[in-house]
Amino acid sequence: MLNDKKNEPAKSIFVANVKGGVGKSTLSIMLARALAKLMPPQNITVIDTDLQRTATEFLTVSNPEINVEFLPITPAFENTNISLVQQFIKQNEFKTGHVVIVDTPAGSSQRLWNLVAEGYCVLIPTTLSNADLLPTENFIRSMDKVKARYAKSLPHLVVCPNKIPFGQKDFSLMAERLKNHDVVIGPALRDLASVRHFYNGRTESWEKKSDGNAKNDFEKFGSFVQKYVLNGKLDKIYNEKNVEENIIPFGKVKN
Ligand SMILES: Nc1ncnc2c1ncn2[C@@H]1O[C@H](COP(=O)(O)OP(=O)(O)O)[C@@H](O)[C@H]1O
Ligand SMILES: [Mg+2]
C-alpha cells in the first residue's frame, strides 16, 4: 500500500457546512473512494449522519469494502446519535492508520458544531458564490469560537472550493475574504458535469458517466488529504513560524 505512515494515530475528518447543497455528501463519498486507493479500505469508515442517506446508499453499492455507519443526526435522534458518533470516534482513536469521515447534514445545531469541533479536521466545501460564501464565513466564525472557548488548535479547518468554473486558478479573492480566519484553502474541485448527474442514476451508471476530469480532481483531493491531513503536514505547517501567506491551494491564510 502507498500509505507509508502506518503508525499515524487515527484521525477523524468532518465534512461540514451550515449550508446545504454545497457538496458535502459528494465530497465525503469521493474522498472515501480516493483514499481507498491509497490506504487499506478496511481502515476507512464513513459515518453518514444525514437522514438523506446519500453516502450510505452510494458507497454500499460502489465500495462495499469501505465501512459505512448510518447514524442520522436530526432533532429527533440528535442526542443519541451525537453520542454514538462521539463514541465511535473515541474508540477509533486507538486504531493507528484509521480514518473516519463524517458526512454531516446542513443546519446550525450547536450540539452538532460542538461535535464537529471534536474532530481532527473539518473539510468545508463551498462554491464561490456569495449565497454560499456568506454562510460559510459564519460557519467558520462559529467553529473558531468553539475552538477559542476550549483553547484548542484543532480541528484544522480546510475550505474546499467546489463547483469551480473550468480555467479558474485564482483564489485570491476567497483568500482575502477568509484572511481573518484560521483556515487553509484546499485544492479546488471543478464544476464537473458527471457529478451533476450524480443522483440521477445508480452507481454503475455514474461510473460510466464519470469522466477524466472528475477522476483527476478527486484523486488530487485524496492525495491532498493523505499528505496534509492523515500524514500530519498541516500540523507541521501550523507549528512553523514563517508560513508563507496565501499559497493556494495549500497555504495557510494569514491571520
Ligand atoms: N464538483 C461538483 N461539480 C458539479 N456538481 C456538483 C459538484 N459537487 C456537488 N455537486 C452537485 O451539487 C448538488 C449538491 O451536492 P451534495 O453533495 O448533495 O451537497 P450537500 O451534501 O452539501 O447537500 C448535487 O446535485 C451534486 O451532484
Ligand atoms: Mg448531504
Image (cartoon, rainbow, N blue to C red):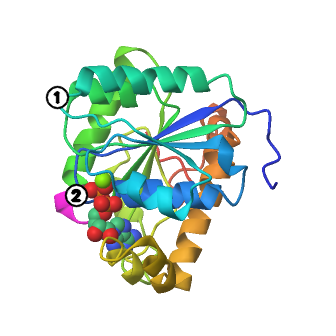
The residue that disc 1 covers is 76
- Residue position marked by numbered label 2 in the rendering: 132
In the image, residue 242 sits, relative to residue 169, either above or below, namely: above
Q: Secondary structure at mark 1?
A: loop
| Number of residues whose C-alpha sits closer than 10 Å to that of mark 2, classed few (under 14), some (14–19) or many (20 or more) | some
Residue shown at the point (45%, 85%) measured from the top left: 209
Percent position of residue 217, x then y: 54, 71
Q: Is residue 140 magenta?
A: no
Asked if the beta carbon under badge 1 is closer than 8 A to the nearest atom of ligand 2, the reply is: no
> Where are the magenta residues, as a range?
128-132
Residue 216, located in which quarter of the rendered image?
bottom right
Q: Nearer the viewer, residue 228 or 2?
A: 2
- Report whether residue 31 is seen: yes
- Report the amino acid beneath label 2: Asp
Q: Quadrant of the C terminus?
A: top left
- What's the residue at 22%, 50% (across, down)? 19
Are dots 2 and 1 in contact, CB under 8 Å?
Answer: no
How many marks on residues? 2
